[in-house]
Amino acid sequence: MSTLQQQIEEARSTALGALQQVQDSTALDEWNREWLGKKGRLTALFRGVGALPTEERAGAGQAINVAKVALETAFEDARQGISAGETEQRLRAEAVDITQPGRPTHAGRLHIITQTTRDVLRAFRDMGFQVYEGPDIELDYYNFELLNIPPEHPARSMQDTFYIDDRLLGIRPAGASMDDLPPVVLRTHTSPNQIRMMRKIAPPVRLIVPGKCYRSEATDATHEAYFSQIEGLAVGKHITLADLKGTLAAFARALFGSDRKVRFRCDYFPYVEPGVDLSIDCMICGGVGCRSCKYTGWLEIMGAGMIHPQVLINGGVDPDEYSGFAFGMGPERISMLRYGIDDIRLFYSNDLRFLQQF
Ligand code: FA5
């Protein structure tokens, strides 16, 4: 046997021995390159064939080929074995234990103020009111002037206002001074919708208008700078204060239960005459007096009144022919009453432990 043939035999058994140590596909590729690759050790042996005496060449070439086929076959077997093992390992790692309990999903929910607002809207819808909306960014003209609150009117100090620099809105012509355009505000109440709606829809109307309001005031247990209101408006022929009282008492009992005590007292708002406020007996303390009702036993839930004739005129409605009532309430205060919450600031502090209770 020539030295080359001995080398071939050795190479073959070394290679097969090494292949048995191979455990994964990376090592297998490495082995393949080392033995069967273009620069591999078996290929190197082929080169030695040329140096042999002619009569030995054919035999040596054949022997290398036999060895090559043997290594290729062994390689193929190893490849299949390793790949099956790796697939099995991967599948095992990916396996899902279907007997495990599912992960809980956190379903979203309506914010408590949204829930209360919808309950209020439903109560009025049941009495034939239609729902509309108006803008949060409002002209001073609608928020105050058309509601009988001219500049310098003392009633302006009833509500501390966030004014908007209307240069930010991009509506002021270049070079115009602050006096050239009416000021723009974040609405302090939903009452500008009285005017907007009267101008838009001819009477008879029964409308309910929810929305956010903004007041530049210090917050406390019953006051927020950002809160909600729901405005109501009924305009038609022969509407009287009795209609206002009947409608609002029916609403209060629909929302809070038929045994609710309701109190109307005179109040002043420049856009109604007469004006009233409506209170309900405090459910938190049972009327004894607590922080929420400021120790009065009553919690005021809305302002209301018969629409002032000048406001009807401003809305394009003839006061000789029509009359109407309007009211405005706060869903935060109503929610406090319904759920016995003693601090309004909880609604928007976004503590999930609080919000998830509703
Ligand atoms: C008004 O805003 C009148 N526009 C209501 C009205 C409408 C009167 C139509 C007559 C006719 P008042 O400022 O009282 O009134 O606010 C009405 C309700 O909004 C209050 O009862 C309260 O529930 C809510 N509210 C007012 N200010 C705040 C505040 N800072 N934080 C939370 N709720 C508030």
Image (cartoon, helix red, strand yellow):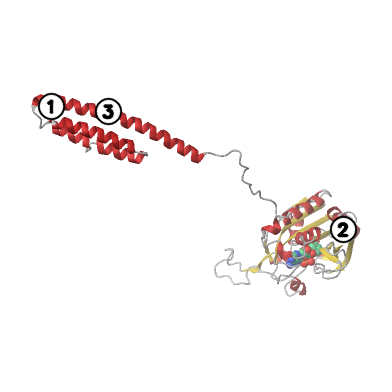
Q: Secondary structure at mark 2?
A: helix
Sequence-first tag of 1 and 2 = 1
- Marks 2 and 3: CB-CB under 8 Å? no
Q: In the image, is the residue at mark 2 within 8 Å of ligand 1 by its beta carbon?
A: no
Nearer the camera: disc 1 or disc 2: 1
Q: Kindly identify the amino acid type of the residue bearing the numbered disc 2.
A: Leu
Query: Which residue is at a point 11% across and 26% down the rendered structure image?
Result: 56
Q: Quadrant of residue 331?
A: bottom right
Sequence-first tag of 2 and 3 = 3
Q: Residues within 10 Å of mark 1 (few under 14, many from 20)?
A: some
Q: Which mark is residue 57?
A: 1
Measured Cα–Cα span from mark 1 to mark 2: 118 Å
Depicted 237 relative to depicted 302: above or below: above
Q: Kindly identify the amino acid type of the residue bearing the numbered disc 3.
A: Ala
94 and 292: which one is in front? Answer: 94
Q: Residues within 10 Å of mark 2 (few under 14, many from 20)?
A: many
- Marks 1 and 2: CB-CB under 8 Å? no
- Marks 1 and 3: CB-CB under 8 Å? no
Q: Secondary structure at mark 1?
A: helix
Measured Cα–Cα span from mark 1 to mark 3: 20 Å
- Rendered location of residue 337, percent (x, y): 81, 60
Measured Cα–Cα span from mark 2 to mark 3: 102 Å
Q: How many marks?
A: 3
* Residue with the mark numbered 3: 70
97 and 16: which one is in front? Answer: 16
Quick one: quadrant of the N terminus? top left
* Residue with the mark numbered 2: 244
- Rendered location of residue 299, percent (x, y): 83, 65
